[in-house]
Amino acid sequence: MSQLILSSLLNGLVYGLLLFMLSSGLTLIFSMMGVLNFAHASLYMLGAYFAYGISAKIGFWNALWMAPLLVGVVGALMERYGLRHVHKHGHVAELIFTFGVAYLIEEVVQLIWGKSNVEYREPESLMFPLFSFFGVEFPAYKGFMLLVSVLIFIGLLMVLTRSRVGLIIQAAITHPNQVAMLGHNVPLIFMLVFGVGSALAGLAGVIAGPVLGTFPGMAVVLGSIVFVVIVIGGLGSLKGAFIASLLIGMLQTFAVAINFQFSTLFNALGLSPGDEGIIKDLYRVSVAQLGPLLPYLLLVLMLIFRPRGLYGTRDV
Amino acid sequence: MNPIISTPRWWQRPFTLTLIIGVLLIMVPHFLSSKLGIAVLNQMFIMVVFTLAYNMLLGQGGMLSFGHAVYFGLGGYFCIHFMNAVAANGWPIPLPLVPIIGGLAGMVLGAIIGSFSSSRAGTVFAMISLGVGELVASSMLIFSSFSGGEEGVTTDRTGFGSFLGLSFAQDRSVYWLITFWMLLSVYLMYKFSRTPLGRMSNAVRDNPERVQFVGYSPRMIRFLCFMASGFFAGIAGSLFAINYEIVTEETVNGLTSGVVLLQAYIGGVGFFAGPIVGAAVFTLLQTLLSNYTEIWALYVGIIFVATVMYAPAGLSGIVMMHRPIAQNHGLGQLLKPYAMCIAPALLAMLGVVGLLETTHALSVGEAEFSLWGLDLDAHSLVPWLSWLAIIVAGATVAKSQWNAMKDAYENELQKAYRAMESS
């Protein structure tokens, strides 16, 4: 049992920090421009595919910095030539634009790399067990993922709170006009933040690709989860995004690990189901099956009862 | 904009117009004998109903939904279970009445989900709809006795007796059924948009605070519109169930929700007819393009993004932009500047298509392929460079003509307004 809990904890941490790498960029972009970027997870997917292409030619370690850079450029271009253009038509148009871009990126990925999984693997230098506990090995690559995520988290925190650029960004979030008055190029700041957010998503894709699989549906799989994270954490709040990422990460890994069926509960209560129908389905449901549903349930409940999320300062 | 409100001629009234179109559509199977043609029309009409229902929220109520397939798909499920129950118990219910069940199911669902999601529009509404959509889609596989698991639920519509001499074993009688429901739904939705409730939903879209100020509840208005939209989406889902005799989990999922948004937006959400145009164009693109190319979905995506960026009012918006000019008989003046800009733009688009097809050929490993009668080799640089040259040349010329085209349009528009004022 303790073995299960420990391994789930570690896996949940890896997954949660990965979610944070995606959601931090998304929540920053949202608080600056008020745009929920549907294409954010698609940029994550692009990161994985770029890394696959680059690492096949010049190795994983080069891909580790080149792919996020490329994705950052794609994101910045998307802001400069797409979103800024659509901005004048209002928020709904912006939302629909990012939705369209997400659709387009998925189709382009299928066009170039095909519809099935690609063989994107971790580097051989990281293919060894880091340590083992209770006979279960913890792969070094996951340790590496953990390290990268933690470094990114600390770096982001430092830049945003301790550096001049970070202060200007924070000011531009709440008072863009005043920042512009002081002589800063606010549209450029927007573009840079969008680019950096995209690059972070790309980096998440680079390091998650070998573990979670690199396939055209990977954006859809993670996309809505990332939305859930930033809504629960509170839109615009990095702290909230961090806590919600870990929460959702743990929730999902633990749900998969727990082997509990509702039939046990029903039996304990002395209830037996009918022969068929909805009740029977409920009877057979296991917690592992409900796992994927929980984040969305949380999302809907959160939006109904506390639309500002855990740490948000304003409603969605 | 239009200062003159003219009373419609007798044939312009919605009811007579619907009747005329209905008579025309009913005669279609006598001229169109191909099964494929009828199948495409069926699909198109189903999508027309669904997209119009969707636009009751997006275009008229200002509610962006990312999970409207829930009402479509679950409406279809309820309908197909009802059909199976009727066939099993031998109830004397004719098939044409069955869509009401799906519609009611959609309406009840709309009432349940609308009761908590309609309190706000904008991003909150969009996110709730997304969450509910994902929730329902992923629970479909759990409740497999309702959803039929991955195989879905099937039915046999011939289990119903004949109705008015139609047996529903033939394609054409199903076509008539779908056409009838399509026309009825379109007419009712049009009438709905003209009721005080429909008008108030436009007001809620534009300025909810002011609506509240004059004493209405924006939430109540959104809620009622949501229910109505769920009803018609359920009707569309039922027509889907009757037409294909199968409903699968796919009808509920996010892809279907995305497609309906795409259709509504390409057609134009600002006009009642927009979604009809969008659904028709999308269905045609889907069926025609998929005959010629494997990457049709990519083209649809490009069209969608281009619409959002350059023509946010959609296809119907472009048409309506020219209405005052047409009334002033000024369209002829626009032909030349339009052709000067659109012809090179089309050339550039041809280049884009060529480039994408070449990429596709390379990625599927059939480097030697033929396109438009040309034999190309994706491994050599020649096709790539020529496509790029065509794109650059076309785009450059089109861009240089853009302002001239815009000026010509503005000019004619001014003329039309002046003519209107002086009359």
Image (tube, coloured by chain):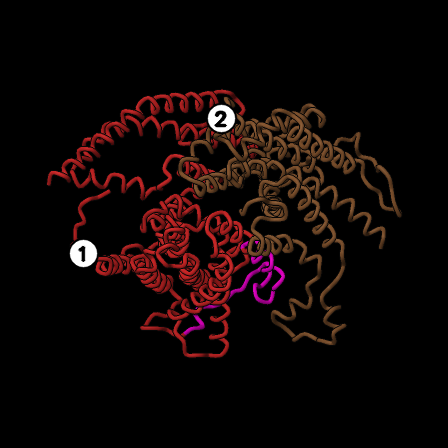
Crowding at mark 2 (Cα within 10 Å: few <14, some 14-19, many 20+): few
Residue A312 sits inside the magenta stretch: no
| A297 and A276: which is toward the camera | A297
Task: Give above or below for B227 relative to B372.
Answer: below
Residue B204: which disc?
none
Residue type at mark 1?
Trp
| A127 and B402: which is toward the camera | B402
Q: Which chain is brown?
A: A
Q: CA distance from mark 2 to mark 1?
A: 57 Å
Quarter holding the C terminus of chain B is top left
Q: Which chain is red?
A: B
For residue A125, what is the image quadrant? top right
> Is residue A87 visible in this depiction of the protein?
yes
Query: Mark 2–mark 1 contact, CB under 8 Å?
Result: no
**Chain letter of the residue carrying label 2:** A
From the viewer's perspective, is B186 left or right of A230?
left
Is there one chain holding both mark 2 and mark 1? Answer: no
Quarter holding the N terminus of chain B is top left
The tally of labels here is 2
Residue type at mark 2?
Ala
Q: Which residues are magenta?
A: B133-160
Residue A180: which disc?
2
**Chain letter of the residue carrying label 1:** B
In percent of width and height, residue A240 lies at 65, 43
Q: Which residue is denoted by mark 1 in the rendering?
A: B11
From the viewer's perspective, is B288 left or right of A124?
left
Q: Nearer the viewer, mark 2 or mark 1?
A: 2
Task: Give above or below for B403 relative to B74.
Answer: above
